Amino acid sequence: MKKNLKITFLGTGTSLGVPEIGCVCEVCTSTDMKNKRLRPSVLVESEEISILIDTTPDLRIQALKYKVNRINAILYTHQHADHIYGLDDIRRFNYLQKSSIPCYGNEKTIKVIMNSFSYILKNDKRFEYFLPKIDFHTINNKFHIGDIEIIPVEVLHGGLSILGFRIGNFAYLTDCNKIPESSRKFLYGLDVLVLDALRKKSHIAHFNLSEAVSEAGLISADRAFFTHISHDLEHNTINKQLPENIKLAYDGLVVEL
């Protein structure tokens, strides 16, 4: 039986966020809230399960702004700072839920997180309230969180092999500039695709806008939304130029399927 899923975009910006510090460009000074972009993350919810993809440095702001009050599991795409450095804020969810939270990623990502947050592994009872309680899991193949199947999808972020995820008929592929042919078999029959689209100019580690449109066309999901968007792309201007079933995502966008 298919699960109904609710996808909330908690952040759709780059590692710098939008507006960028000290920038006075048209997008960074825009009053349109769709041009305000926190670091990239989504919350995937069914009736029973709430799954966070990546813990950005903006996690506390995102949780308060979009009323994220429960996290049953965390999926990590990769180990870069804009995707992991909000991990400490998970301790509030530990307190609310009275439990540790499982985190899943590939071997390299889990190693980096454990090194970066080594203090949480000390299990010092004196400071228990102040330490996130995390159960780390290295993943290579599909697995389940509750009754939801998670399929890791390998993509390339420059020279780095990272993970996207397919959950039901939804797939999230951020921070990538190439999808290996071996991964395409996991992307058939999607209702919703989320894909990296950094800017108009080419980049060594991210799809640019035209590349993302081309990839979305190849994958042929019913709907596609672009994320990891820089200040080079003004929301309304770009959306008018995109195919009808492809749009820029924005912070706070909710998609149901």
Image: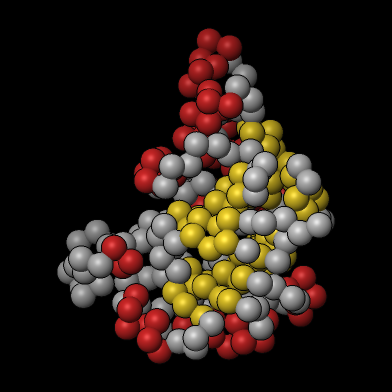
Q: Nearer the viewer, residue 143 or 68?
A: 68
Along the horizontal axis of the image, is 211 left or right of 123? left
From this view, report whether residue 243 is shown above or below residue 16. below
Which residue is depicted at the point 50% across and 56% down? 8
Q: Nearer the viewer, residue 160 or 186?
A: 186
What is the x, y in percent for residue 17? Answer: 35, 60
What is the x, y in percent for residue 200? Answer: 41, 84
Q: Residue furthest top?
A: 126
What is the x, y in percent for residue 12? Answer: 44, 63
Question: Splitting the image into 4 quarters, where does residue 110 fall?
Answer: top right
From this view, report whether residue 167 is shown above or below residue 227. above
Along the horizontal axis of the image, is 232 left or right of 124? left
Which residue is depicted at the point 57% across and 61% down? 256
Along the horizontal axis of the image, is 186 left or right of 203? right
Question: The C terminus appears in which quarter of the rendering?
Answer: bottom right
Q: Nearer the viewer, residue 197 or 250?
A: 250
Q: Nearer the viewer, residue 251 or 134?
A: 251
